[in-house]
Image (spheres, rainbow, N blue to C red):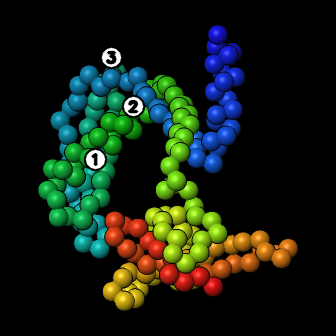
C-alpha cells in the first residue's frame, strides 16, 4: 500500500516543483542535566564603544562530577546588568553541556508546496500589470524608492529572449491600494 501512495504522490511533487521549497533543519539535543550550581561570580566591565561586558564563572554538578563554567555577554548598557549576566550564565551552561555531553542530532527535511500566484515572479509584464512587490525583480542599480504623482515607485528589470538573444528590459512600478504595485512604464 505504501508503494501506491508514493507513486501517486511523486508526480504531484514534480509538477509543483516551481511552487515548492525544501526546508532543512538540524537540531542538536544534549543529554546533560545540570543537577546543581555553585554561587555565581560575576564581573561587569567596560567594553568598546561604551558597551559593557558581563563575565561569569561558577561550577556545575552533572551526575557525580563538578565542572567549571565560564560565560560572557556584551550589551549596549541600556538594559540592567542582571539581564545581561543571565544570558552569560545560559551560555556558560550550554558550553558545559557541549563540552562534556554527548548530543543527539536530528535532521528534518520538509517540502513546502504552495500554489499561490502571488508567490511566483511575473513574466512578460506589460503596462497595467498588477502584482505584489516581491513578484518584480529589483533593478540592480536603482534600488531606492521615489515618489511620482503622489505614489511611491520603484525601478524593476525583466529579461526576455527575443530575436535569438537575451534582452533586459527595465521599468517602473508604483504602489496602489492594498499593497499592490502596477507597471506604469517598461522599456
Whether pointer 3 and pointer 2 mark residues with C-beta atoms closer than 8 Å, the reply is: no
**Image-based side of 81 in relation to 33, left or right:** left
Residue 128, x across and y down, in percent? 51, 75
Query: Which mark identifies residue 97?
Result: 2
Seen from the viewer's position, the closer of residues 161 and 40 is 161
C-alpha separation, residue under disc 3 versus residue under disc 2: 15 Å
Q: Residue at x 70, y 22 (%)?
A: 7
Q: Name the outermost residue toward the bottom.
A: 149
Residue 80 in sight here: yes
Seen from the viewer's position, the closer of residues 15 and 40 is 15
Residue 89, x across and y down, in percent? 26, 42
Query: Which mark identifies residue 80?
Result: none
Quarter of the image for residue 161 reads bottom right
Q: Name the outermost residue toward the right.
A: 164
Q: Which residue is mark 3?
A: 64
Residue 100 in sight here: no
Q: Residue at x 55, y 78 (%)?
A: 127
| Category of crowding for the residue at label 3, using alpha-carbon neighbours closer than 10 angstroms: few (below 14), some (14–19), many (at least 20) | few
Q: Earlier in the sequence, mark 1 or mark 2?
A: 1
Q: Which residue is mark 1?
A: 88
Whether pointer 1 and pointer 2 mark residues with C-beta atoms closer than 8 Å, the reply is: no
**Image-based side of 141 in relation to 14, left or right:** left
Q: Earlier in the sequence, mark 1 or mark 3?
A: 3
* Vertical relation: 78 (above or below) 25: below
Q: Considering the numbered disc 3 on the image, is that residue within a helix, a strand or a loop? A: loop
Seen from the viewer's position, the closer of residues 109 and 166 is 166
Amino acid at each position: 500500500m505504501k508503494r501506491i501512495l508514493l507513486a501517486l504522490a511523486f508526480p504531484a511533487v514534480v509538477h509543483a516543483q516551481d511552487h515548492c521549497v525544501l526546508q532543512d533543519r538540524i537540531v542538536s539535543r544534549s543529554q546533560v542535566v545540570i543537577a546543581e550550581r555553585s554561587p555565581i561570580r560575576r564581573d561587569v566591565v567596560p567594553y568598546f564603544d561604551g558597551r559593557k561586558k558581563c563575565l561569569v564563572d561558577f561550577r556545575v554538578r552533572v551526575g557525580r562530577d563538578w565542572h567549571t563554567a565560564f560565560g560572557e555577554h556584551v550589551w549596549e548598557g541600556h538594559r540592567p546588568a542582571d539581564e545581561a549576566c543571565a544570558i552569560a550564565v545560559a551560555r556558560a551552561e550550554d558550553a558545559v553541556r557541549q563540552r562534556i555531553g554527548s548530543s543527539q542530532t536530528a535532521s528534518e527535511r520538509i517540502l513546502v508546496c504552495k500554489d499561490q500566484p502571488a508567490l511566483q515572479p511575473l513574466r512578460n509584464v506589460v503596462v497595467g500589470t498588477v502584482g505584489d512587490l516581491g513578484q518584480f525583480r529589483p533593478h540592480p542599480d536603482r534600488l531606492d524608492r521615489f515618489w511620482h504623482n503622489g505614489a511611491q515607485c520603484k525601478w524593476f528589470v525583466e529579461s526576455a529572449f527575443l530575436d535569438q538573444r537575451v534582452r533586459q528590459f527595465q521599468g517602473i512600478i508604483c504602489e496602489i491600494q492594498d499593497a499592490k504595485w502596477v507597471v506604469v512604464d517598461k522599456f
